[in-house]
């Protein structure tokens, strides 16, 4: 095993994902897998999406919207309402209403029994609440990834949780002021979203420079929570925590106008240098 000495280390190992979200590292392989993924969805007639967070809801809505009644789409979510309680009930109920209008079947407050993976059928599924879903052509897991804490488990075992590794407001590890953890790896009281990683990186960049200069470090302040969940190109719902107004629901027009047209892909490509 190679040892690499360092003055400062930033650990950003993110999450480990189940297929189909475990996208390969190379561009060619990623494009190949995405094309195959789309072909499997197009060929399937009875699809089950497991997990009703943002990814699962958007995926179920996209399939139902794109194929307009030609496929049976079922969404299974462990909570009684879609997404999670960070967001207001009007937002969550609005998504449910729109999915029902698209013909998506839902089992909320329920889980699939046994093990499952990104599998083509036909397979039969049973839920803990006693529902049977037979003849499923395609099972798509969308329950989120597991935080990849492996690099730090031996160093700070007491700081590891299912949500990541606990960090100081400066993103430093307890007892290791020259090691930082950011992104999904950091166990913070905020929703894990890609749009927040730039804020994490900016704080760590400042703090490493300040450490070298011997000046005070700065603390991270989590932004107000906001989310836009699209259901195809014209549907969806949003929720944003505005000053004074609090948690405010944003309707389908907002989702369509700001995200539905391109899913923020041009902005993401620009930010990543493509």
Image: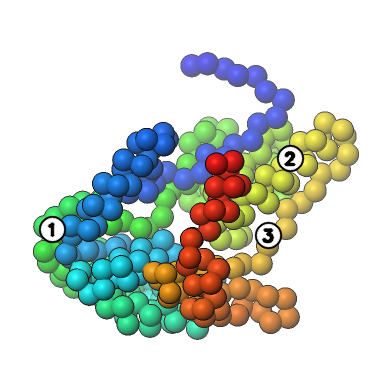
**Marks 2 and 1 in Cβ contact (< 8 Å):** no
Q: Is residue 163 visible?
A: yes
Considering only vertical position in the picture, is 38 above or below 60? above
- To which residue does mark 3 refer? 222
**Which residue shows up at 71% across the image and 33% down it?**
178
The quarter holding residue 65 reads: bottom left
Mark positioned earlier in the residue sequence (2 or 1)? 1
Identified at 88% across, 34% down, the residue is 214
Residue located at (76% from left, 51% from top) = 219
Q: Is residue 19 above or below residue 138?
A: above
Query: Residue 27 vs residue 5: left or right?
Result: left
Q: x and y percent of residue 154 in the render? A: 53, 32
What's the coloring here?
Answer: rainbow
Front residue of 33 and 274: 274
Q: Earlier in the sequence, mark 1 or mark 3?
A: 1
Q: Can you see residue 114?
A: no
> Which corner quadrant of the image does residue 24 belong to?
top left
| Foreground tag (2 vs 3) | 2
**Residue 205, disc:** 2
Q: Position of residue 165 (x, y in %)?
A: 57, 45
**Disc 1 and disc 3: Cα gap in Å?**
43 Å
Residue 92, x across and y down, in percent: 46, 77
Q: Which residue is mark 1?
A: 123
Label 2 crowd (10 A; few <14 / some 14-19 / many >=20):
few
Helix, strand or loop at mark 2:
helix
Q: Marks 2 and 3, Cα distance to the nearest angstrom?
A: 16 Å
- Density class for disc 1 (Cα within 10 Å; few <14, some 14-19, many ≥20) is few
């Amino acid at each position: 095993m190679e040892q690499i000495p360092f003055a400062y280390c930033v650990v950003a190992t993110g999450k480990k994902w189940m297929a189909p979200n475990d996208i390969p590292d190379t561009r060619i392989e990623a494009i190949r897998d995405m094309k195959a993924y789309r072909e499997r969805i197009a060929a399937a007639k009875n699809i089950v999406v497991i997990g009703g967070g943002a990814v699962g809801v958007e995926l179920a809505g996209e399939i139902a919207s794109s194929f307009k009644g030609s496929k049976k789409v079922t969404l299974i979510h462990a909570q009684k309402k879609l997404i999670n309680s960070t967001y207001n009930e009007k937002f969550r109920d609005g998504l449910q209403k729109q999915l029902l209008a698209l013909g998506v079947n839902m089992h909320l407050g329920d889980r699939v029994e046994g093990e499952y993976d990104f599998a083509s059928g036909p397979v039969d599924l049973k839920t803990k609440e006693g529902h049977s879903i037979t003849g499923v052509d395609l099972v798509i897991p969308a329950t989120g990834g597991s935080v990849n804490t492996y690099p730090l488990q031996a160093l700070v075992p007491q700081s590891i949780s299912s949500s990541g590794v606990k960090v100081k407001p400066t993103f430093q590890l307890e007892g290791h002021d020259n090691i930082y953890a950011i992104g999904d790896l950091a166990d913070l009281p905020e929703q894990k979203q890609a749009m927040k990683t730039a804020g994490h990186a900016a704080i760590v960049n400042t703090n490493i420079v300040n450490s070298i200069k011997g000046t005070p470090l700065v603390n991270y302040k989590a932004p107000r929570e906001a989310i836009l969940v699209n259901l195809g190109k014209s549907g969806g719902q949003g929720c944003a925590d505005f000053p004074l107004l609090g948690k405010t629901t944003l309707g389908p027009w907002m989702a369509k106008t700001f995200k539905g047209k391109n899913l923020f892909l041009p902005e993401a490509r620009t930010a990543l240098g493509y």
